[in-house]
Structure formats: C-alpha cells, structure tokens
Amino acid sequence: MKASIYIGYNFDVTPSNPGVEILIAELGYAGFESFVEHSNGVTAYIQKEDYYPSILDDIQILNNNTFTINYTSEEIEQVNWNAKWEENFHPILVDHRCSVRAPFHSKPSVEYDIVIEPKMSFGTGHHETTHMMIQHILATDFTNKSVLDMGCGTGVLAILAEKRGATLIEAIDIDEWCYLNSVENCSRNSCQNITVSKGDAQLLDTKVFDVIIANINRNILLNDIPQYVACLNPNGLLFLSGFYEKDIPAIQELCTMHSLVLEGQILRNKWVALKFKKIDGK
C-alpha cells in the first residue's frame, strides 16, 4: 500500500479540559481524521489531499479567549503510528465488564477483553463517544443479531458485538488505514463473524440489519441516517454518536421523520450517544 501523506498539527491547549475535547470535535468537522492526545493537548492528523491552507479559519475555539492554544504543523509521509499510540495508549475498563487494551498490556480478569493496535484509527475506547457506544452494546442483547458498524475505526465496536453474540457483522470505514487496522484487530481477537469493507454508506445497497452502529460525526450522520433506516429491520436498533449534546435536537428531528423512536441516551463530557428503535412495520 502506498503510504499516505499527512499534515500533522500539534496543539498545546490551556485549560485542556474541556478545551481538548472541543478542539477535537471542531477539527473532526473540518476533516481531521485521527487524534493523539498528550499531556499538553492533542496532535491532529489530516490527509494532505484533504488539506487546504485556510482549514483552521472556521475552528471557533482558536478565537475563544477562554482558551490559550498554540500550535505547529508539519508534513508527514511515513510515521510509526504504533509507536506514537504506545506512548499515549493506556488500557481502559468500561463498566467493569469490558477492557480495551494493547497487546503489550497485561490481560485483565473481565467479561470482555478486546486487544487492539490502533495505528491511525479512531476508536480505542478512550474517546467519549467510543466509550459510550461500548456502554450501549454492553446493555443490549446482541444474541444472533445482524449488525452494521459504520465508521468502524479500529473495529472495537464490531468486535464487542461479536463477543456479545452477534452472528453476522459488517464493519465499514472509508479510510484505508482504518480498514486495514480493523481487519488486523478482528484477526487478533479471533473474530469469525465480521466482514470488513472499505467505503461508505453507498456500499449498503439493499442490505438489512437488526442493529446499526454509527459513531462518525454530526454532518455525516445527518446525511446518512435515511440510508441507515432503509437498511434497518422493523424493531431494529440504531445507535448514533460522534456529536455533542447540543446536536441532539437536529439528530432526533431527522430520526423522528424516519420512523425512529428515541429509547435511550448516554452523556459524557458534553458528548452523547443515542439509542433509537425503528417503529414496527415502517
């Protein structure tokens, strides 16, 4: 595979809480695809082909006097992403039931142990949205379910869905690194029921699922929710995250228009993960 060229921005943020989370959200909307948090802030990466010189002009937090943010940038062709993640990646425990760790961490005594090497992929469990989606999966019966994981990142949510009993799982991500990383992580966790594909919602066609998981961002979700609903079985569940609490009205309004009923939500540091159910017969 030809190495992708990235532009990396290193941001020092004061105060870091909640500055880093706000900055990551705004950068995600702007097209930055991967983030490595550090003690002073965050380093954000965007593929050079998606970059343009004025990309930071609409990042509102940079003009917010509440925060002091300094940054530098560089072009990066080849990076040992694993080494970068190992410097910052610590094992996590969600609801005392699910561990997400790297191979070099010791194995914990938990119900679900997921081992990943995140490389440049989003979704280690450390970010609020992935953490909340794990909580939703732990609270939901996945026995014999068919599942779609859109924007799968590391594949951690698809992997947990299989561990929870799902028998047919499709994991899709538009990014080449995420696609390859998900394939590797599924193999690393001995998954048998997951098919990983590179692409977006256009791959769905007429496929149908019992559960759809989409942890992406507000704009993509608002564009793709109608497609998700078309691919969801009656009484099927749709889990959405990747956006702020303030975005709930826009997301919920669109979902209601497409025969979805809000059944639950989890909030974490202003981020939110919503659970919708498709009305029977629609």
Image (tube, grey):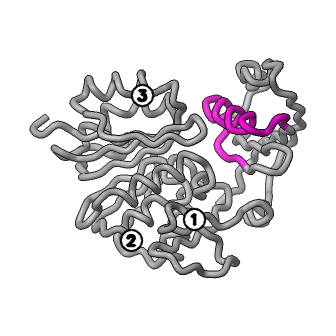
Q: Secondary structure at mark 1?
A: strand
Q: Name the residue that disc number 2 marks.
A: 163
Residue at the image point whose x is 43% and y is 65% from the top: 160
Residue most toward the left?
281
Residue at the image point whose x is 50% and y is 76% from the top: 110
Q: Name the residue that disc number 3 marks.
A: 222
Lower sequence index among marks 2 and 3 = 2
Q: Amino acid at mark 1?
A: Leu
Graded by Cα atoms within 10 Å as few (under 14), some (14 to 19) or many (20 or more), the crowding at tag 1 reads some
- Where residue 80 appears, as percent x and y from the top left, is 78, 63
1 vs 3, front mark: 1
Q: Secondary structure at mark 2?
A: helix
Q: Is residue 34 left or right of residue 173?
A: right
Q: Which is nearer the eye, 264 or 164? A: 264
Picture quarter with the N terminus: bottom right
- Magenta stretch? 13-35
